[in-house]
């Protein structure tokens, strides 16, 4: 099998995808600047893995990374909504211009494979909605952050390059991903890893706003299987990756206490700019197109993460 390029492959999600592809017998090239990814996440002793340290902002680096690859999975990004609000130019440089660097190199190299990329549930926006799962056609909503704007622009450019230049593109709108290798001390970490870390220590859990924000948490092992199936499919467009099950942040904090069988004090902090009130995926299209869906329940996933953290 020909080589797959995974940008951001040393990161939380990317490294799990790399493991899965290597297990399938694929050759994998990783491009990562290690700004948030960790080299220890990668099995560097595997002869089928090639690691390149570099940024998607560097056109020369991207050009080299794209040579002689059959498929590309683009996961490199600045994924923090708060950081994107504080530094919108930095967010655009990485999330939009970096994305275009990859697309342009694939176009110039007459790339004929699959281009799979990470979009985000942030493209659905944050206006008050009825509690209904979000369908692919519901985007864009009222975008609340530079990160959301960048991700929606990614979708527009991917569709445009498909129409103009014949690239085969598929974007996945990630909902809230969690699992092993998510660093609770990182500014880019998700709420589950942070809550689990603090509950395990008996420390205070901080909840922004009233805690009634609703989220759809998808286990990283399930998500990367969907990415692998996306490579094998011919579908072009965007698909949600979530579970279709909603839970409030307050309820999540209660689950942590059950998982660890200990109390952890909760304090409510001021609501954050860019924080979305309702986010739950409609996964009918995912099931129809790929014939599969995430299977790991939240309770099962939390137990797996607890085991990894201990």
Image (cartoon, grey):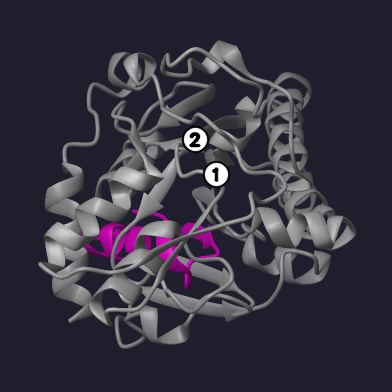
Give the mark nearer the N terminus: 1 vs 2.
1
Q: Residues within 10 Å of mark 1 (few under 14, many from 20)?
A: many
- Mark 1 and mark 2 in contact? Answer it, CB < 8 Å: yes
Side of 26 relative to 24 (left or right): right
Residue 18: say if magenta: yes
Q: Residue at x 52, y 17 (%)?
A: 136
Residue 200: say if magenta: no
Compared with 28, 100 (above or below) is above
Q: Residue at x 28, y 19 (%)?
A: 287
Residue 141 x %, y %: 68, 21
Residue 72 x %, y %: 53, 50
Compared with 124, 219 (above or below) is below
- Which residue matches tag 1? 118
Residue 61 bears which disc, if any? none
The mark total stands at 2
Q: Is residue 303 visible?
A: no
Indicate the secondary structure of the residue bearing disc 2. strand
Residue 233 x %, y %: 38, 28
Compared with 72, 141 (above or below) is above
Q: Work out how far the residue at label 1 is from the one at label 2, CA to CA, in angstroms.
A: 5 Å
Please name whichever residue, 66 or 221, is drawn nearer the observer in this view of the structure: 221
Side of 95 relative to 12 (left or right): right
Indicate the secondary structure of the residue bearing disc 1. strand
- Which residue matches tag 2? 172
Residue 304 x %, y %: 15, 63
Which quadrant holds residue 257? bottom left
Q: Residue at x 79, y 54 (%)?
A: 85
Q: Bounds of the magenta span?
A: 1-28
Side of 74 relative to 18 (left or right): right
Please name whichever residue, 200 or 16, is drawn nearer the observer in this view of the structure: 200
Image quadrant occupied by the C terminus: bottom left
Q: Is residue 295 visible?
A: yes
């Amino acid at each position: 099998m020909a080589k797959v390029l995974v940008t951001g492959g040393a990161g939380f999600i990317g490294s799990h995808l790399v493991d899965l592809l290597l297990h399938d017998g694929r050759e994998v090239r990783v491009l990562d600047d290690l700004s948030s990814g960790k080299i220890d996440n990668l099995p560097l002793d595997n002869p089928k893995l090639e690691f390149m340290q570099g940024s998607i902002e560097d056109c020369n680096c991207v050009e080299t990374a794209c040579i002689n690859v059959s498929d590309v999975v683009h996961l490199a990004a600045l994924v923090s909504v708060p950081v994107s609000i504080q530094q919108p130019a930095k967010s655009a440089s990485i999330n939009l211009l970096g994305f275009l660097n990859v697309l342009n190199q694939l176009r110039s190299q007459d790339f004929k494979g699959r281009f799979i990329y990470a979009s985000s549930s942030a493209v659905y926006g944050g206006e008050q909605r009825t509690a209904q799962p979000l369908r692919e056609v519901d985007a864009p909503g009222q975008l609340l952050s530079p990160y959301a704007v960048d991700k929606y622009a990614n979708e527009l450019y991917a569709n445009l390059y498909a129409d103009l230049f014949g690239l085969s593109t598929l974007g996945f709108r990630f909902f809230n991903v969690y699992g092993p290798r998510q660093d609770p001390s990182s500014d880019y970490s998700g709420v589950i890893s942070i809550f689990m870390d603090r509950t395990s220590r008996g420390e205070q859990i901080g909840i922004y706003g009233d805690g009634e924000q609703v989220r759809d948490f998808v286990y990283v092992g399930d998500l990367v299987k969907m990415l692998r199936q996306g490579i094998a499919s011919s579908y072009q467009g965007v698909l949600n990756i979530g579970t279709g099950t909603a839970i409030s942040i307050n309820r999540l904090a209660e689950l942590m206490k059950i998982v660890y069988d200990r109390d952890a004090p909760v304090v409510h902090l001021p609501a954050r700019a860019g924080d979305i009130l309702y986010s739950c995926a409609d996964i009918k299209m995912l099931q129809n197109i790929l014939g599969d869906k995430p299977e790991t329940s939240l309770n099962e996933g939390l137990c797996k993460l607890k085991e990894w953290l201990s």
